Amino acid sequence: MPARLSLILADRPTGRAPLVALAGAVEGSPVGARVDLALARGVEAVASAARQAAGGGQEVVVAWSFLSPEVAEVREELARARSGMPARVVNLAGGAHATADPAGTLALGFDLVARGEGERTLVGVLEKLAAGGDPRGVAGLAWGSRAGLATSGRPDPVRLDDHPGFSRRLAKALWLEVTRGCAWGCRFCQTPFLHRRRFRHRSVASARAFARFARSLGHRDLRLLTPSALSYGAEGGEVRLEAVEELLAALREELGGDGRLFLGSFPSELRPEHVSPAALRLLRRFVDNRELLLGAQSGSERLLAEMKRGHGTSEVVRAVRLASAAGFRVAVDFIVGLPGETAEDLAATRRLMAELAQRGARIHAHAFLPLPGTPLRDRAPGQVDPATRALLDRLGSRGRAYGSWRRQLELGEALSRLRGEGPRPGGSGGG
């Protein structure tokens, strides 16, 4: 049985924040004292850290987290990393994509996939390895077998306060996750289907501890991570401004006079129906961002209803008007190429984009991606028609539109090509 274990976190930009939070969960667990932690940036650094730890007789786990559009580049990175590390190193993938498409993720070359929330699963894997056991008995895993895809069921939901969200050993505190899950069920989004359409919130005391540690590292800025900026403390679609105010006031106190607090900008956009004069006064009082990001997604009432957005276009227009009057700049998310989108739907979306731009908003444009784990996972990737391209180009030339929609067109095609690869579900395990 190894004296120590090594957990190497593959430091990719989109996976850094969740992996740092997982490192904090490991540190606070009983097995944490036996685990050496390393954050390795780049393929060569990952492979070198794994070789060194394995050469010292340690059991080694390399943890990866990535998004669906990054699958092709991760496959290449993993292949290069594996060629430079011993075969017995366990490469473990987690996150929304891995959860939604475990078979496809295993086909990339991973040994294990963590399905769902990773805190308990990762700790369980390390505990099993520390005891000389087989980690495949830990809840929340998937792996390839002769029968196809084997799974060990889902772990119980995580209580956010049980884990700090930061890593003392790595001296890292990135985004503060205050809410996990989502009460809505937008058909294009992975979040509600990953977390079973319910909210869980971090307590004010736990959020204070995060802010205090971040300040001890010299951080000035604190960005809150939540699927809906004004849903803190809520059970469903309601807004509890008193809960939001208690959280923001506490964080502002911890940050001090030179600290900066961000909510309502990435990664914590606003739902348009939540925008009100009272909510805007609260944000003006406590947050430092002067641009708010709103999720509209379409200008078609039909598509908004079909996608189960939970609001219409009138709420979007009202939110932009109110936020602008309150002194905020506004950016508005739109997705072009949604399944079933007609010429009439596109015309309605263009009209809304043009109206909002005229009101001073910036249009944040996306091309539809068929993300694994969503009801639209098997649909074709979105296309952007010539008229909408022309409008986005015109608005962009005036500083009224931005976004990675061109790159997403390419990513959608790559995602479709990779769809369905890997072992298919077999007769082993639950889930």
Image (cartoon, rainbow, N blue to C red):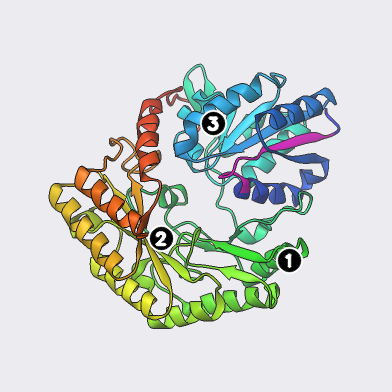
* Crowding near the residue tagged with mark 2, few <14, some 14–19, many ≥20 C-alpha atoms within 10 Å: many
Q: Quadrant of residue 237?
A: bottom left
Instruction: Name the one closer to the observer, 13 or 391.
Output: 391
- What amino acid type is highlighted by mark number 3? Val
Residue at left offset 64%, top offset 65%: 221
How far is mark 3 from mark 1, CA to CA? 33 Å
How far is mark 2 from mark 3, CA to CA? 31 Å
Apparent side of residue 192 relative to residue 164 in the rendered image (left or right)? left
Contact, mark 3 vs mark 1 (Cβ under 8 Å): no
Q: Secondary structure at mark 2?
A: loop
- What amino acid type is highlighted by mark number 1? Arg
Q: Secondary structure at mark 3?
A: helix
- What amino acid type is highlighted by mark number 2? Ala
How far is mark 2 from mark 1, CA to CA? 32 Å
The x, y position of residue 153, in whole percent, is 52, 38
- For marks 2 and 1, give the one nearer the viewer: 1
**Upstream in the sequence, badge 2 or badge 3?**
3
Residue underneath mark 3: 74
**Upstream in the sequence, badge 2 or badge 1?**
2
Q: Secondary structure at mark 1?
A: helix
- For marks 2 and 3, give the one nearer the viewer: 3
Instruction: Name the one closer to the observer, 197 or 45.
Output: 45
The x, y position of residue 256, in whole percent, is 70, 76
State yes or no: residue 6 in magenta: yes
Instruction: Name the one closer to the observer, 7 or 133.
Output: 7
- What range is drawn magenta here? 4-16
* Label number found at residue 261: none
Residue underneath mark 2: 183
Residue at left offset 48%, top offset 32%: 71
Residue underneath mark 1: 215
